[in-house]
Image (tube, rainbow, N blue to C red):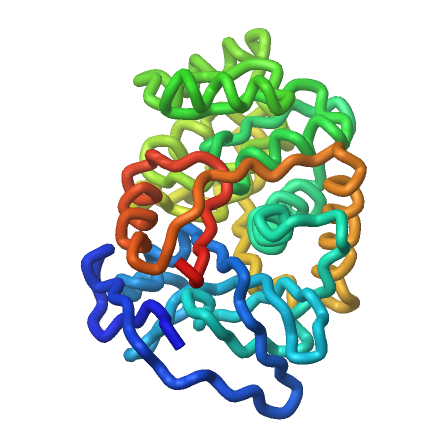
Amino acid sequence: MRAIQITEFGGPEVLNVAELPDPVAGPGQTLLEVSRAGINYADTHQAENSYLAEAALPLVPGGEAVGLTPDGRRLVALLGTGGYAEKAVASEAMAWDVPDAIDDVTALGLIVQGASAWLLLRRSVHLAEGESVVVHAAAGGVGTLAVQLAKAWGAGRVIATASSKDKRDLALELGADVAVDANEPDLKSALIEANGGRRVDVVLEMTGGRVTDQSLRVLAPFGRLAFYGMASRTPPTPVQPAALMAHSTTIAGMWLAHVFQLPGDVMGAALSELFGLAADGRLRVIGGGEYGLAEVRRAHEDLRSRRSVGKLVLDPAR
């Protein structure tokens, strides 16, 4: 089969097309004929071995795929690795049936980005009706869905940030009440102004560096910031626990992998709600572009340079 293989860690240049043996499903696993694989920002960290889970070489990247099983079931699956290929092996426990009303891009957009937005709002910050919410990187995969979910679940004001006018316009189209330039030098003041002069209740943040620093300073009493990535690759300033008492604020971290350590089928519940909202037309996954195997380097370059919008997918047949 054709696949992308990494034999040394680094940037997009280490992603190479290779001919590899077909994977073989073992006990508790199923083989997928991959129709589309998801391309995520986490994959850029996996390629350079800077992700939370350490990678081992040689590596076929790609943590999610949708496709058909040998018996004709259409599944979307979390893989860990192996998605950037014509065939992949998935654990039965990490694969879910895709309703007929859900297309490939939507299924892939919901299994990681959608589930992440669901967990951030439902479990990390426990969004309450009427609260104000800042969604950073609002034109990205998680951001576009978080904006829509926050509005659907009764947020009083959704404030989006994005780095270009087109991205801010998209966030407004999806339901944000106001959009702020992510490059504002005084981001704290811009966010407070966008919230009518008041501090905000909730911030969803995945940039790191100064964006995290200024976002913490914008939280209202009992405000919560959920941190789920560091796209700038610049760590924020360390926070002293005593400093959280100044406004009774909370910082939460979220990594999707930990959902499987929770009691009950939380992931299944999240996907069931998300698939239902999407099937009813109340939640829209923004397609950000489709790439063939030979174009994967460009996909990673687009992600790293923040040129992309919405959900990027790989077509292994191309």
Q: Is residue 19 left or right of residue 168?
A: left
State whether residue 92 is above or below residue 147. below
- Front residue of 16/146: it is 16
Q: Residue 20 location in percent, x, y?
A: 35, 81
Residue sitting nearer the eye, 144 or 3: 3
Q: Residue at the location (55% across, 27% down)?
A: 134
Q: Nearer the viewer, residue 318 or 125?
A: 318
Quick one: quadrant of the N terminus? Answer: bottom left
Residue in the foreground of this view, choosing between 52 and 291: 291
Q: Is residue 261 visible?
A: no
Tell me where residue 78 appears, x and y as whole percent.
57, 66
* In the image, residue 120 above or below residue 202: below
Q: Is residue 305 left or right of residue 220?
A: left
Tell me what residue is drawn at x 30 percent, y 63 percent: 47
**Res. 4 image quadrant:** bottom left
Residue 42's place in the image compared with 203, above or below, is: below
Residue 10: % across, % down: 21, 62
Report x, y in % for residue 157: 66, 18
**Is residue 135 shown to the viewer in this render?**
yes
The part of the image, by quadrant, that contains residue 117 is: top right
Q: Residue at x 45, y 26 (%)?
A: 217
Residue at the far front: name it.
Answer: 318
Tell me: 75 left or right of 225: right
5 on left or right of 222: left
